[in-house]
Image: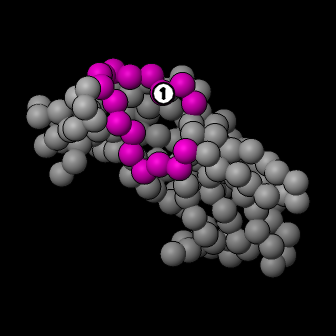
Amino acid sequence: MAKGNEGGLRLAYTIFCDDVRLEVGNKLSLMGVFHQILVQHVPVTVMKFAVVTQWRGEGRHLSEVRILSADRQQPVVLAEPSPFEVAAGGVANNISFFFNVEFPAPGRYRVQTLIDSSLADEQELTLVLVDQNGLPAPDATSEAVN
């Protein structure tokens, strides 16, 4: 579902993935699309991932992506602001890459996208602690999965 703001800019989607490539014909290839991160220990450092957004509308805008703790009080990582432009009636993809991000604990993190310094979208990214078999760890499931 598209979300909008005052300037006619609408968010078509937000996707989390391991990597993004730009292909011939200006097509994006997304590798390793996910909605949660499974880890066997915390704290954990995630070497690389991307947040991909697609916008519809028009105009020049400034995008910022930040990942916050579940209570929205502690920043985990802040992306550098990046400008983008949407031609009238067109679409624009904005990709924020993150490297060596340390997540201190399992739980629900908030991925916020700001456009022109205003909050445009917020998505949940869950970090789940699992055992060596990939099953949720008994002591971590209540916070991470509920």
Whether residue 7 can be seen here = no
In which quarter of the view is residue 131 placed?
top left
Magenta stretch in the rendered image:
32-48
Q: Which residue is mark 1?
A: 46
- Residue 59, relative to residue 31: is it above or below? below
Q: Quadrant of residue 104?
A: top left
Can residue 93 be seen at all in this image of the molecule?
yes
The percent coordinates of residue 68 (x first, y second) are 41, 39
SS of the residue under disc 1: strand
Q: Main secondary structure of the magenta part?
A: strand
Q: Amino acid at mark 1?
A: Val
Q: Is residue 40 magenta?
A: yes
Q: Is residue 141 left or right of residue 77?
A: left
Q: Quadrant of residue 72?
A: top left
The residue that appears at 34% across and 30% down in the rendered structure is 39
Furthest residue toward right? 25
Q: Is residue 118 left or right of residue 35?
A: right
Name the residue rendered at 37%, 33% in the picture: 74
Q: Which of the pair 141/105 is nearer the observer?
A: 141
Vertical relation: 66 (above or below) 94: above
Q: Looking at the image, is 133 positioned above or below residue 60?
A: above
Q: Residue 29 at what x, y percent from top left?
A: 70, 51
42 left or right of 55? left
At label 1, counting other C-alpha atoms closer than 10 Å, the crowd grade (few under 14, some 14-19, many 20 or more) is some
Residue 102 pos. (x, y %)? 43, 24
Asked whether, in this view, residue 58 is left or right of residue 65, the answer is: right
Q: Quick check: 118 above or below 4?
A: above
